Image: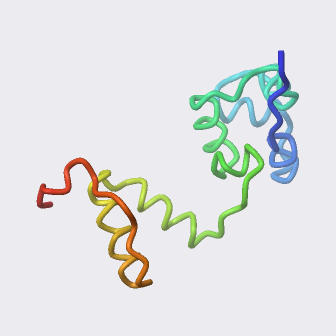
Amino acid sequence: MAVMENRLRQLREAKKLTQGELASRIGTTGDQISRLESGERRLTVNWLSRLERGLECDGVEILGGVKLSPRERRWLDYFQSMSEFEQHRWLRALAALQNDPPGGEPANANHAS
């Protein structure tokens, strides 16, 4: 089985949490946290969601991506709370401000919001 690399251990240690403390926060066992950290257990969407709450970070950070600033996190949360149509409208508006129109229209582009 291939090992799934992640930054779970580094993030947990940065928060000064033991495996047991993190496990308690997300309703699992320290053994499961150990398996997730080592890559023995796959980081599913469900696990990532639980770990995001327990570590107060986002899945991108856990998977080794870029750390978001608090302002970037607020923008991302706001964007993700929108419907797909609203997201497309925002992206078009931002692109127009940059004079760089995106290609393609959403499937429901004819609907007014």
Residue 99 percent location from the top left of the image: 41, 84
Total marks placed: 0
Question: Which image quarter holds the N terminus?
Answer: top right
| Image point (69%, 23%), residue name | 28
Instruction: Reply above or below: 13 against 92.
Output: above
Residue 8 percent location from the top left of the image: 80, 41
What colour scheme has been applied to the protein in the rendered image? rainbow
Residue 16 percent location from the top left of the image: 86, 49
In the visual, does 25 lie left or right of 11? Answer: left
In the visual, does 77 lie left or right of 97? Answer: right
In the visual, does 109 lie left or right of 16? Answer: left
Instruction: Reply above or below: 64 against 69.
Output: above
| Image point (43%, 78%), residue name | 100
Question: Residue 96 lies in what quarter of the image?
Answer: bottom left
| Image point (67%, 49%), residue name | 60
In the visual, does 62 lie left or right of 3? Answer: left
The residue at the far top in this view is 1
| Image point (58%, 32%), residue name | 45
Foreground of the two, 93 or 16: 93
Question: Which image quarter holds the C terminus?
Answer: bottom left
Question: Residue 2 lies in what quarter of the image?
Answer: top right
Instruction: Reply above or below: 107 against 5.
Output: below
